[in-house]
Amino acid sequence: MFLSKKIVCMTIFTALTLSLCLFGAAAPCRAQASAASSDDAHPFDTNALTPWVTPASVVADSVSTDQPTSGDPAGSPPPQAAKSVPDDGWHFAVSPYLWFPGAHGILEGPNGNGIGFHASAGDLLSHFQIGLMGAVQASHKRIVTSVDIFWIRLEDDQAIPLPPAVGDGAISAKAHATEFFLTPKIGYRVIDQEKIKIDAMAGLSYWHLGESLSFNPSVLGLNFTGSQNFVDPIVGGRIQLALSPKIVLNILGDVGGWNTGSKLEYQFGGFLGYRIKPALTLQVGYRYLNLDYVGSRGTIFNMTTDGALIGVTINLK
């Protein structure tokens, strides 16, 4: 029972250690043609972690072809006038990030028996084997798109002493847990102002949860490998608030599932972005993610994962 409980807990921890929101993602930038202009580039947002890309403003000088007049004996040209031209190009950004969450929840089998679990960020980190977290974003005028990817693999290896009635020695038990999710979204910028930007988003969330358990020597054929795969529709939004020329507050959230893949999944987060360079933004914040999944055999998996997040957004264009 102790072994079963430990394996189940570790599998669950893995499942929601993922992760971004896009969370990580892309940060916006504004190109500036004049050094005297106050319209500086501001890095915005993180989508479950993905920062936003804001279209840049291009300043074009209009050159006068007027000839000198009698009132201008020196023949000097009149002052040039500056005219703003809309930016019709695409903008791209990438945002690698690290999420340091704790996890807690319950796992219940088809017969109604269940266990609760709780693991700190340190507990999960101690079993970390390999992972990948990041987000990519593209924007064109008011159209915004983002893709958040999260993949993590945890491992635990324990020696279980044999009962005295069986003999001396121990059995080696090794468990692996893998979580992967991919969240593509597309949205429309409903409000696009200098101090505030609001996006409405919709998309899909693909989940893969994998687990394996092996014993050495093998005990009564108890080795097993399993996985769960499902897709959820999701809707959500995000808000950018410019606090200063270099600092922006990003708030995001989404919800989905509704008994399609999972019973329900939702997340929210808040992040502060600080522009270190025109094309480089540091992102720090907090992310909360909950997944309520009911398997085909009646297995219930309900886990909450939350914790601090840190990342960097690189504007490519």
Image (tube, grey):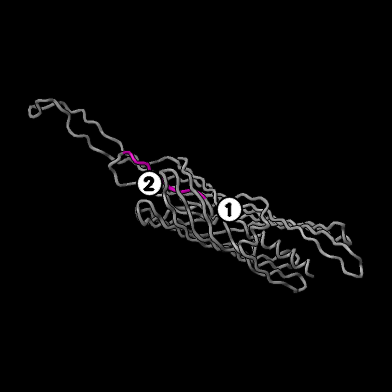
Name the residue at the front extreme: 168
**Disc 2: CA contacts within 10 A as few (<14), some (14-19) or many (>=20):** many
Give the alpha-carbon distance from disc 1 to disc 2, as whole Å.
27 Å
Q: What's the magenta bit mostly, secondary-structure-wise? A: loop
Question: Where is the C terminus found, in terms of image quarters?
Answer: top left
Q: Residue 24: x percent and y percent?
A: 53, 52
Q: Residue 218: x percent and y percent?
A: 87, 58
Per the image, the residue denoted by label 2 is 41
Please, is residue 111 above or below residue 46 in the view? below
Of 247 and 85, nearer the camera is: 247
The answer to whether 231 appears left or right of 167 in the picture is left
Nearest-to-viewer mark from 1 and 2: 2
Q: Which of pointers 1 and 2 lies earlier in the amino acid sequence?
A: 2
Q: Residue 280: x percent and y percent?
A: 45, 45
At a point 38% along the width and 44% down the height, the residue shown is 30
Please, is residue 200 above or below residue 264 in the view? above
Q: Amino acid at mark 1?
A: Thr
User: SS class of the residue under badge 1?
Assistant: strand
Can residue 207 be found in the magenta stretch?
no
Dots 1, 2 in contact, CB < 8 A: no
Q: Quadrant of residue 160?
A: bottom right
The answer to whether 154 appears left or right of 309 in the picture is right
Name the residue at the left extreme: 70
Can residue 26 be found in the magenta stretch?
yes
Query: What is the number of the mark on residue 183?
Result: 1
Question: Where is the N terminus found, in terms of image quarters?
Answer: bottom right
Magenta stretch?
A: 25-33
The answer to whether 92 appears left or right of 56 in the picture is right
**Disc 1: CA contacts within 10 A as few (<14), some (14-19) or many (>=20):** many
